[in-house]
Amino acid sequence: MIKEVIVVEGKDDITAVKAALECEVISTNGFGYKKELVETLKSLAERRGIIILTDPDYMGEKIRKDLSNKIKNCKHAFLPQGKALKKGDIGVENATVEDIIEAINKARPEIVEINKQFTKEDLIDFGLSGGESSRQRREKLGEILGIGYANAKQFLNRLNNFGVSREEFLKAIERIDNDGR
Protein backbone atom coordinates (compact mmCIF):
# COMPACT_ATOMS: atom_id res chain seq x y z
CA MET A 1 0.00 0.00 0.00
CA ILE A 2 1.21 3.49 -0.84
CA LYS A 3 1.93 5.59 2.25
CA GLU A 4 0.70 8.90 0.82
CA VAL A 5 -2.93 9.74 0.19
CA ILE A 6 -3.64 10.51 -3.46
CA VAL A 7 -5.74 13.60 -4.20
CA VAL A 8 -7.83 13.56 -7.38
CA GLU A 9 -10.69 15.64 -8.79
CA GLY A 10 -13.68 13.27 -8.95
CA LYS A 11 -15.34 9.92 -8.24
CA ASP A 12 -14.30 8.37 -11.56
CA ASP A 13 -10.68 9.33 -10.82
CA ILE A 14 -10.93 7.54 -7.46
CA THR A 15 -12.15 4.40 -9.21
CA ALA A 16 -9.32 4.52 -11.77
CA VAL A 17 -6.58 5.10 -9.17
CA LYS A 18 -7.89 2.38 -6.85
CA ALA A 19 -7.98 -0.04 -9.80
CA ALA A 20 -4.28 0.71 -10.38
CA LEU A 21 -2.94 0.89 -6.82
CA GLU A 22 -3.65 -0.14 -3.28
CA CYS A 23 -3.98 3.28 -1.71
CA GLU A 24 -6.19 5.86 -0.05
CA VAL A 25 -7.71 8.40 -2.43
CA ILE A 26 -9.58 11.63 -1.72
CA SER A 27 -11.52 13.67 -4.25
CA THR A 28 -11.77 17.45 -4.31
CA ASN A 29 -15.04 17.18 -6.26
CA GLY A 30 -13.75 19.82 -8.65
CA PHE A 31 -12.57 23.32 -7.76
CA GLY A 32 -15.45 24.19 -5.44
CA TYR A 33 -13.98 22.39 -2.43
CA LYS A 34 -14.49 23.73 1.06
CA LYS A 35 -12.06 24.91 3.70
CA GLU A 36 -12.71 21.68 5.65
CA LEU A 37 -11.22 19.60 2.82
CA VAL A 38 -8.09 21.76 2.80
CA GLU A 39 -7.76 21.32 6.58
CA THR A 40 -8.15 17.53 6.20
CA LEU A 41 -5.51 17.47 3.47
CA LYS A 42 -3.14 19.57 5.60
CA SER A 43 -3.48 17.04 8.41
CA LEU A 44 -2.95 14.12 6.03
CA ALA A 45 0.08 15.84 4.48
CA GLU A 46 1.67 16.06 7.93
CA ARG A 47 0.84 12.49 8.97
CA ARG A 48 1.15 10.49 5.75
CA GLY A 49 1.92 12.86 2.89
CA ILE A 50 -0.25 13.57 -0.12
CA ILE A 51 0.25 13.17 -3.86
CA ILE A 52 -1.76 15.52 -6.07
CA LEU A 53 -2.85 13.80 -9.30
CA THR A 54 -5.20 16.14 -11.14
CA ASP A 55 -6.39 16.10 -14.74
CA PRO A 56 -3.88 17.47 -17.27
CA ASP A 57 -6.09 20.43 -18.20
CA TYR A 58 -6.64 24.03 -17.13
CA MET A 59 -8.90 23.23 -14.17
CA GLY A 60 -6.64 20.40 -12.98
CA GLU A 61 -3.68 22.78 -12.94
CA LYS A 62 -5.74 25.41 -11.14
CA ILE A 63 -6.67 22.89 -8.42
CA ARG A 64 -3.04 21.65 -8.16
CA LYS A 65 -1.70 25.19 -7.80
CA ASP A 66 -4.33 26.21 -5.25
CA LEU A 67 -3.79 23.12 -3.07
CA SER A 68 -0.01 23.33 -3.19
CA ASN A 69 -0.19 27.02 -2.17
CA LYS A 70 -2.29 26.08 0.87
CA ILE A 71 -0.65 22.77 1.85
CA LYS A 72 3.02 22.18 2.54
CA ASN A 73 4.96 19.06 1.55
CA CYS A 74 2.76 17.92 -1.34
CA LYS A 75 4.12 15.61 -3.99
CA HIS A 76 2.97 16.09 -7.56
CA ALA A 77 2.15 13.35 -10.06
CA PHE A 78 1.42 14.19 -13.68
CA LEU A 79 -0.26 12.33 -16.52
CA PRO A 80 0.53 13.49 -20.06
CA GLN A 81 -2.60 14.67 -21.90
CA GLY A 82 -2.22 11.91 -24.48
CA LYS A 83 -2.39 9.26 -21.75
CA ALA A 84 -5.48 10.78 -20.13
CA LEU A 85 -7.54 11.29 -23.27
CA LYS A 86 -10.51 9.23 -24.40
CA LYS A 87 -13.01 10.36 -27.04
CA GLY A 88 -12.10 14.01 -26.54
CA ASP A 89 -12.41 13.84 -22.74
CA ILE A 90 -9.27 14.58 -20.68
CA GLY A 91 -9.07 13.10 -17.21
CA VAL A 92 -7.27 10.76 -14.84
CA GLU A 93 -10.21 8.36 -15.19
CA ASN A 94 -9.22 7.76 -18.85
CA ALA A 95 -5.64 6.66 -18.11
CA THR A 96 -4.55 3.02 -18.11
CA VAL A 97 -3.53 1.23 -14.93
CA GLU A 98 0.09 1.26 -16.13
CA ASP A 99 0.07 5.00 -16.81
CA ILE A 100 -1.40 5.79 -13.39
CA ILE A 101 1.22 3.61 -11.68
CA GLU A 102 4.00 5.30 -13.69
CA ALA A 103 2.71 8.78 -12.80
CA ILE A 104 2.59 7.95 -9.08
CA ASN A 105 6.03 6.36 -9.19
CA LYS A 106 7.41 9.57 -10.73
CA ALA A 107 5.70 11.84 -8.17
CA ARG A 108 7.98 14.65 -7.05
CA PRO A 109 7.89 17.00 -4.11
CA GLU A 110 7.87 20.72 -4.76
CA ILE A 111 11.06 22.12 -3.31
CA VAL A 112 10.65 25.12 -1.03
CA GLU A 113 14.11 26.53 -1.71
CA ILE A 114 13.99 27.22 -5.41
CA ASN A 115 17.02 25.93 -7.23
CA LYS A 116 17.74 28.19 -10.21
CA GLN A 117 19.71 25.45 -11.95
CA PHE A 118 17.88 25.88 -15.25
CA THR A 119 17.47 29.10 -17.23
CA LYS A 120 15.52 30.42 -20.21
CA GLU A 121 18.71 29.95 -22.21
CA ASP A 122 18.66 26.21 -21.40
CA LEU A 123 15.14 25.98 -22.79
CA ILE A 124 16.22 27.72 -26.01
CA ASP A 125 19.52 25.78 -26.33
CA PHE A 126 17.77 22.42 -25.97
CA GLY A 127 14.89 23.28 -28.31
CA LEU A 128 12.29 23.58 -25.55
CA SER A 129 11.34 27.19 -26.28
CA GLY A 130 11.11 29.33 -29.40
CA GLY A 131 11.29 26.54 -31.99
CA GLU A 132 8.78 24.76 -34.20
CA SER A 133 8.92 21.53 -32.21
CA SER A 134 9.42 23.11 -28.76
CA ARG A 135 5.95 22.18 -27.54
CA GLN A 136 6.43 18.52 -28.51
CA ARG A 137 9.88 18.40 -26.92
CA ARG A 138 8.56 19.87 -23.64
CA GLU A 139 5.72 17.37 -23.72
CA LYS A 140 8.10 14.40 -24.20
CA LEU A 141 10.58 15.73 -21.63
CA GLY A 142 7.82 16.37 -19.10
CA GLU A 143 6.61 12.79 -19.54
CA ILE A 144 10.10 11.30 -19.12
CA LEU A 145 10.87 13.43 -16.04
CA GLY A 146 7.38 13.04 -14.56
CA ILE A 147 6.73 16.78 -14.33
CA GLY A 148 3.97 17.00 -16.94
CA TYR A 149 3.48 19.36 -19.88
CA ALA A 150 3.53 23.13 -19.43
CA ASN A 151 4.23 26.26 -21.44
CA ALA A 152 7.89 27.33 -21.49
CA LYS A 153 7.71 29.65 -18.47
CA GLN A 154 5.89 27.12 -16.28
CA PHE A 155 8.11 24.28 -17.54
CA LEU A 156 11.18 26.21 -16.41
CA ASN A 157 9.58 26.67 -12.98
CA ARG A 158 8.86 22.94 -12.77
CA LEU A 159 12.43 22.02 -13.71
CA ASN A 160 13.71 24.25 -10.92
CA ASN A 161 10.99 23.57 -8.32
CA PHE A 162 10.70 19.79 -8.61
CA GLY A 163 14.35 18.96 -8.02
CA VAL A 164 15.30 17.83 -11.51
CA SER A 165 19.07 17.39 -11.65
CA ARG A 166 21.18 18.56 -14.58
CA GLU A 167 22.27 14.95 -15.17
CA GLU A 168 18.68 13.69 -15.20
CA PHE A 169 17.73 16.51 -17.58
CA LEU A 170 20.58 15.77 -20.00
CA LYS A 171 19.82 12.03 -20.05
CA ALA A 172 16.17 12.76 -20.84
CA ILE A 173 17.16 15.20 -23.63
CA GLU A 174 19.52 12.56 -25.06
CA ARG A 175 16.68 10.01 -24.97
CA ILE A 176 14.38 12.39 -26.88
CA ASP A 177 17.09 13.16 -29.44
CA ASN A 178 17.85 9.45 -29.97
CA ASP A 179 14.17 8.51 -30.26
CA GLY A 180 13.68 11.15 -32.95
CA ARG A 181 16.17 9.55 -35.33
Image (tube, helix red, strand yellow):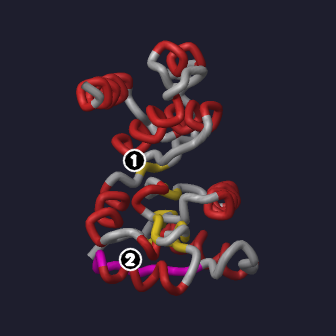
Graded by Cα atoms within 10 Å as few (under 14), some (14 to 19) or many (20 or more), the crowding at tag 1 reads many
Amino acid bearing label 2: Val
Graded by Cα atoms within 10 Å as few (under 14), some (14 to 19) or many (20 or more), the crowding at tag 2 reads many
Q: What span is colored magenta in the figure?
A: 20-27
Name the quadrant containing residue 176: top left
8 over 178 or under it: above or below: below
Residue occupied by mark 2: 17
Q: Which numbered disc, 1 or 2, marks the residue that appears first in the sequence?
A: 2
Classify residue 152 as left or right of residue 69: left
Q: Which label belongs to residue 146?
A: 1
Question: SS at mark 1?
Answer: loop
Label 1 – label 2 distance at C-alpha: 17 Å
134 over 39 or under it: above or below: above
Q: Which residue is painted at 59% across and 19% down in the image?
A: 120
Question: SS at mark 2?
Answer: helix
Name the quadrant containing residue 60: bottom right
Whole-percent x and y of residue 157? 59, 34
Classify residue 36 as left or right of residue 10: right
Whole-percent x and y of residue 5? 44, 73
Total number of numbered discs in the rendering: 2
